Amino acid sequence: MSFRHTVGGQVWAFGDLKDLMAKASPPRSGDSLAGIAASSHGERMAARMCLAELPLGTFLQECVIPYESDEVTRLIIDTHDAQAFAPLAHLTVGEFRNWLLSEAADSDALASVKRGITPEMAAAVSKLMRNQDLVIAASKCRVVTRFRDTIGLPGTMAVRLQPNHPTDSAAGIAASILDGLLYGAGDAVIGINPVSDNLPVLIDLLKLADEVIARFAIPTQSCVLTHVTHTIEAIEKGAPVDLVFQSIAGTEKANASFGVSLALLAQARAAAQSLARGPLGDNVMYFETGQGSALSADASFGVDQQTCEARAYGVAREFSPLLTNTVVGFIGPEYLYDGKQIIRAGLEDHFCGKLLGLPLGCDVCYTNHAEADQDDMDNLLTLLGCAGVAYIMGVPGADDVMLNYQSTSFHDALYLRTLLGLKRAPEFEQWLQKMQITDTQGRLQSVARSHPLLAQQKLQA
């Protein structure tokens, strides 16, 4: 199906739905690299005007990637909830935007329609929204998940404690874990990116994190962010696995480049749930995504990178994860060139994920060769805090010495919590008070050298 729109006597033509979506996207280097971006501001605005008049039902009739050739498309179409979509079925994309920004679209209303919204619908409406629209609409979406603590409650923001080390040193990782805990970080997960894919090393890291959590009775969960097949092997060998991690994308071919399929993700989820390690819930999956992954794998099929990203959330939604986050600036300036594009993408990703019913967090980050700096990250961090982000990263000094990129620090989380009055996960907040790391108001306290966390001289991997 082709689309046409006339502006000031000039007729703009768009070959199909994916062409219309790409041309309506805000500028970003990845779409330009793919040769699908609008050629001018005029074409972009014409595409947005055309998209605004498009009935939402069009996305159920025309797929941006064919149903027959892509299992992600089949998942999106086959799991679509027609009953949840019914209240929105009469709307155009522009009217959908207006509804999302209205008082009628409160948290309950948004929760009731989330399974009726396809990723492409979410991506389309985001293209018509200003940054402030993305913030206010996302702030009304509430998604709560549970394992050992509760993530996503109103007025809370969690932090992933990210204690990476360039040699997988147990002592170095343990030191970073203790540092983060003393700053009140770690309620989302203690998540280690390993250097090695060697299974005995991975199991040692799992045991290290599990030992810390068990020794101090911390109401949080651990994860070693290795490939899903390695985690399944670790489970089979009796390793203490809480969460299963996997990077995912929005097309079958892109996921294949990661070495995963929907069937493999289902197998991993079942394996982790069989351990029954979560006393509060069975949300056992942890996914990471990022705009540009499908294009970098030559697997975008001419679909713009933001729509591909939204489709990745369609994959994540199927497996009811505890955590999902966009690693927004990690892939590099080839896909998001500068701070302006990174900020916009972060807000889009967060909005689309929350709208679809995901516990969406964000790694507010950039690589050292991008046209961005920490001030840009401060801006995005603050906007996401206002938008109700589920969690952010806590990296010692904001500089990940293993992955070699810039993220957010334990101090950045304190800034945002102080500014907006955000609490930690309630179970974790209570633990911090019990350990006298924070006072009853959640404020950090000085700890003596005799504090139990500091008194531990050695943690065995």
Image (spheres, rainbow, N blue to C red):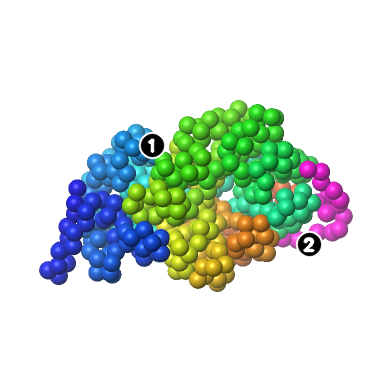
210 falls in the magenta region? no
Amino acid type, mark 1: Glu
Q: Secondary structure at mark 1?
A: helix
Circle number at residue 138: none
Residue identified by numbered label 2: 446
Q: Position of residue 197 (x, y in %)?
A: 65, 43
Q: Position of residue 49 (x, y in %)?
A: 23, 61
Mark 1 is surrounded, within 10 Å at the Cα level, by few (under 14), some (14 to 19) or many (20 or more) other residues, namely some
Examine the rendering and report whether any part of residue 91 can be seen: no
Identify the residue shown where x is 28% and y is 70%: 41
Comes first in the chain, label 1 or label 2 = 1
Q: Which residues are magenta?
A: 439-461
Q: Position of residue 284 (x, y in %)?
A: 57, 37
Q: Nearer the viewer, residue 277 or 419?
A: 277
Q: Nearer the viewer, residue 390 or 336?
A: 336
Residue identified by numbered label 1: 71
Q: Position of residue 390 (x, y in %)?
A: 53, 52
Q: Image check: 329 left or right of 458?
A: left
Q: Image check: 205 left or right of 19?
A: right
